Amino acid sequence: MVALTALWLPILVSAVFVFLASALIHMALGYHAADYGRAPSEDAVMDALRGFSIPPGDYMLPCPGRTGGRDPEFAAKHKKGPVVIMTVLPAGDMRMGKQLVMWFVYCLVVGLFAGYLTSRAQPAGAPYLEVFRFASTVAFAGYALALWPLSIWYRRQLGTTIRSTVDGLIYSLLTGGAFGWLWPS
């Protein structure tokens, strides 16, 4: 068993690798451009919504409330449509500093869990491939598996979930590689 404190370097390096890979994926490769479609009459829709001054948050239209889908009024609204699940972000400049910091912290947390579980399964000096296998599997769970319920329950486009799962696979391989490379001997 390896002490978790001995894994600070692979945790940090894996987070840096994933952070840089995600920047490359999102800024250079462009395959996430299909994740969100443009609403018909975008300007008119934005103008209409702006008048409601909806605060930032997550919304469902119609909202089932506490009764769920059993309320006849909700069922009628749902049948009539449109049915919308939306996230409203704050208006203003598109500054991403806070989100980038939070993403890096998340990468550290995934690395921490990957390191913890791998440290319980593999001794110091374990072969690269054994360390890689454990760490990358845990990292894949952290980066990709939680995305699938969004397609199952909220009907997020399957293509978006698949593309994000591919990202998670890349991130997990980088994490496993960092752990295998820097595993204590």
Image (cartoon, rainbow, N blue to C red):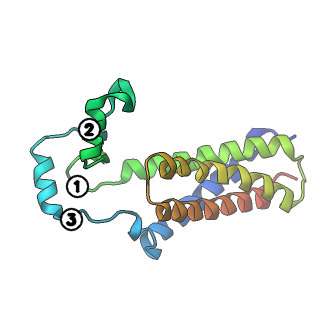
Q: Quadrant of residue 6?
A: top right
Q: Secondary structure at mark 3?
A: loop
Return the disc, 3 or 2, that comes first in the chain's sequence: 3
Q: Secondary structure at mark 2?
A: helix
Q: Quadrant of residue 95?
A: bottom left
> Residue 149: image x %, image y %?
53, 47
Q: Can residue 56 be seen at all in this image of the molecule?
A: no
Q: Are marks 3 and 2 in contact (CB under 8 Å)?
A: no
Which is nearer the eye, 66 or 165? 66
Q: Which residue is mark 2?
A: 76
**Residue mark closest to the camera, 1 vs 3:** 3
The residue located at (59%, 47%) in the rendering is 108
Q: Which residue is mark 3?
A: 40
Q: CA distance from mark 3 to mark 2?
A: 24 Å
Return the disc, 1 or 3, that comes first in the chain's sequence: 3
Amino acid on which the number 3 mark rests in the picture: Pro
Please indicate whether residue 106 sits to the left or right of residue 59 in the image.
Answer: right
Amino acid on which the number 1 mark rests in the picture: Asp
Amino acid on which the number 2 mark rests in the picture: Ala
How many other residues sit within 10 Å of disc 1, few (<14), some (14-19) or many (≥20)? few
> Residue 92: image x %, image y %?
20, 51
In the picture, which quadrant includes the N terminus?
Answer: top right
> Residue 14: image x %, image y %?
65, 56
Q: Can residue 180 be seen at all in this image of the molecule?
A: yes
Return the disc, 2 or 1, that comes first in the chain's sequence: 2
Residue ranking furthest to the top? 66
**Residue mark closest to the camera, 3 vs 2:** 2
Q: Which residue is mark 1?
A: 93
The residue located at (73%, 62%) in the rendering is 177
> Residue 61: image x %, image y %?
27, 41
Q: CA distance from mark 1 to mark 3?
A: 24 Å
Q: Which mark is residue 46?
A: none
